[in-house]
Amino acid sequence: MKIGVDATCWANVRGYGRFTRELCASMVAPNVELVTVPLGASPTEAASADGNRSPFDMLKLTRAVSKHSLDVFFSPSVYTYFPLPPRMRAVVTIHDAIAERFPELTLPSRKARLFWKAKVKLALWQARVVLTVSEFSKRDISRVLGVPLERIRVSVEAPAAIYRPSESPADIRRVAEKHGLGADARWLVYVGGFNPHKHVDLIVRAHAAVAKTSTTPLHLLLVGTIDKDVFHGDQARIRATIAELGTEALVRWTGFVADEELRHLHSGALALLLPSACEGFGLPAVEAAACGAPVIATRESPLPELLEGGGVFVHPGDQKELTDALTLLATDEPARRRMATRALAKARELDWQRGADVALAALREAAR
């Protein structure tokens, strides 16, 4: 079977890039031919919240695919999807229906929303099989986008092997000190983009409420790209909220943190926070759980099932519920430890090989 793969989404954000790299790791192999197509704009720029590929670039990509006698073409992310040659069998991955459910929070302009709608509609029309990352997303995609359930296959994600509990408290202290955390500091971690639907402003408010009553400094680490985030950002409002609450000394914008360092921050954290409006999978929470950190995460996600018992799951947008959850993990250490143990056990049940097997089966199915 000869498979074509859109590798342009390798240059994407943490979750989508991980999905592509793990499922397509075999691309560096003797039976793989890499085809380079020079483009006028980078894939990341073209797939940004207010960007799009030029018709000329799309034509170049389509022509490049048409030159090869492929049995099937795989698009690991609809973000970088481009039109395929007519009658080309295809599998397209749609991670979630967040852009459709919350367009004003994810796509900043009418133009961006129109381009997104057209791209997804074409991708679904050309795809014989749709791949997604959770049963939660499968139901959402079917309900919101009208895709029959029998056309959707679920390739569940997993933490990368690097995400595991730190072997040494000294490593945790070393990385913590690098980010300005003192020896007696406690911290919470958020990992991801600073988009409105992530509700980072609510995290900041919950953190401020709990930090005021903490007998030791309680820090909040905001981990994620600050100046190169191509998606619809909300940094100005988050920074204004921090200034309003007077917690500048306790909130740290780390920028990008490499996986090897991030696992130490997770290992020493009180919890990972991900109270988004919606998550198709919630990979940052699963990665933190694999390091032994409990989570406070949104109910609008597969996380209550994937990490059942491994944290507190809150209704999106509920400030009191989020604050109460944070208070519990900051003040009840036995409960926090029980959740951490459970989170680690549940994360270890997830396996990239299972996801890869489903993806390969979907490609074979579409090729037939």
Image (tube, helix red, strand yellow):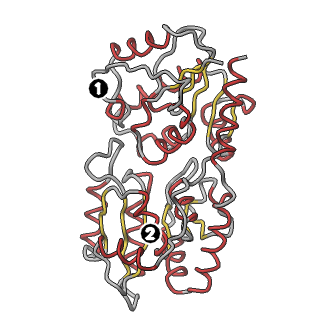
Rendered location of residue 71, percent (x, y):
63, 15
Residue flagged by tag 2: what amino acid is it?
His
Q: Say which mark, if any, is on residue 264.
A: 2
Residue 70 horizontal/vertical position (percent) = 58, 13
Question: Residue 84: percent from the left, percent from the top?
Answer: 51, 15
Residue in the foreground of this view, choosing between 86 and 148? 86
Label 1, residues with CA under 10 Å away: few <14, some 14-19, many ≥20? some
Is 78 drawn above or below residue 177 in the view shown? above
Instruction: Decide if residue 36 is on the left or right side of residue 81.
Output: left
Q: Quadrant of the N terminus?
A: top right
Q: Residue furthest right?
A: 150
Rendered view: 263 above or below 5: below
For the C terminus, the quadrant is top right
Query: Which type of secondary structure does the marked residue at label 2 adopt?
Result: helix
Q: Is residue 247 left or right of residue 360?
A: left
Badge 1 amino acid: Ala
Q: Tell me residue 173's x, y (percent).
A: 38, 78
Which tag is nearer the camera, tag 1 or tag 2? Answer: 2
**Occupied quadrant, residue 92:** top right
Above or below residue 192? Residue 187 is below
* Residue at 54% over, 51% down: 278
Question: How many badges with numbers are in the image?
Answer: 2
Which element carries disc 1, helix, strand or loop? Answer: loop
Above or below: residue 115 compared with residue 349: above
- The residue that mark 1 highlights is 41
Q: What is the spatial separation of the Cα atoms under label 1 and label 2, in whole angstroms?
A: 36 Å
Which residue is rendered at x = 69% and y = 21% of the image? 366
Residue drawn 44% across the image and 12% down it:
64
Crowding near pointer 2: few (<14 within 10 Å), some, many (20+)? many
